[in-house]
Image (tube, rainbow, N blue to C red):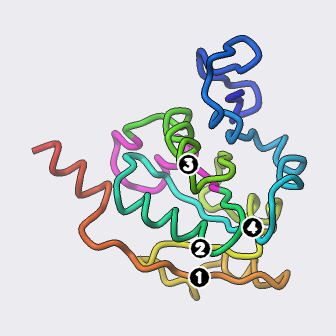
Amino acid sequence: MLALRGEVKAPGVDRRHNRGMPDFIDKLCPRHELRDRLVALPRPLVFTNGVFDILHRGHVIYLAQARALGASLVIGLNSDASARGLGKGPDRPLNGEADRACVLAALESVSLVTLFDEATPLALLELVRPELYVKGGDYDIESLAETRLVRSWGGDARAIAFVEGYSTSALVRRIGG
């Protein structure tokens, strides 16, 4: 069931009423169910976050590499409101949160997808408490508040090499002409 924001449901994805829905829908997790769902995931748990607006090869490689660092991968997905606050442009994200969440959940490397409305995933990280926090190599991992938080409970943080030539912003510019 897609109920990422508690009461908000995307049409046609409630598994109770649509028996033909794909299994990946079960990877979508509203925040209020997160604690219970995390218990069932194998450890070590890897966490990453982002907008993932137009999924491309760079994202898929990054997520597969992140999953390879642990037994489960949880994605904190910026809600539409949170994504708009990142200054990527007035029309971003191009894909809504429910659509972005479904595309991510369909990936084999992804164990669970949940939304966050805040500017940073700090509160979500506190709830998930992963053993490893990862970001793309375009971030200075040592300067992030997320890194300090995860290390405070004995976890670690790592940057995964950025896949050159792949950027959603560059792709949007190219499509726009």
SS type, badge 2: strand
Q: Which amino acid does label 1 sit on?
A: Arg
Circle 4 Cα neighbour tier, 10 Å, few/some/many (<14 / 14–19 / ≥20): many
Position of 158 with respect to 165 (left or right) is: right
Residue on which disc 2 sits = 134
> In the orientation shown, which residue stands out farthest toward the left?
177
Position of 28 with respect to 40 (left or right) is: left
Circle 3 Cα neighbour tier, 10 Å, few/some/many (<14 / 14–19 / ≥20): some
Q: Quadrant of the N terminus?
A: top right
* Residue at the image point whose x is 67% and y is 29% from the top: 2
SS type, badge 3: helix
Residue on which disc 3 sits = 82
Front: mark 2 or 3: 2
Residue on which disc 1 sits = 158
Residue on which disc 4 sits = 45
Q: Which x, y percent locates residue 76? A: 64, 54
Real-space Cα separation, disc 2 to disc 1, in angstroms: 5 Å
Q: For the residues labelled 2 and 1, say whether their Cβ atoms are less than 8 Å apart.
A: yes
Sequence-earlier tag: 4 or 1:
4
Sequence-earlier tag: 3 or 4:
4
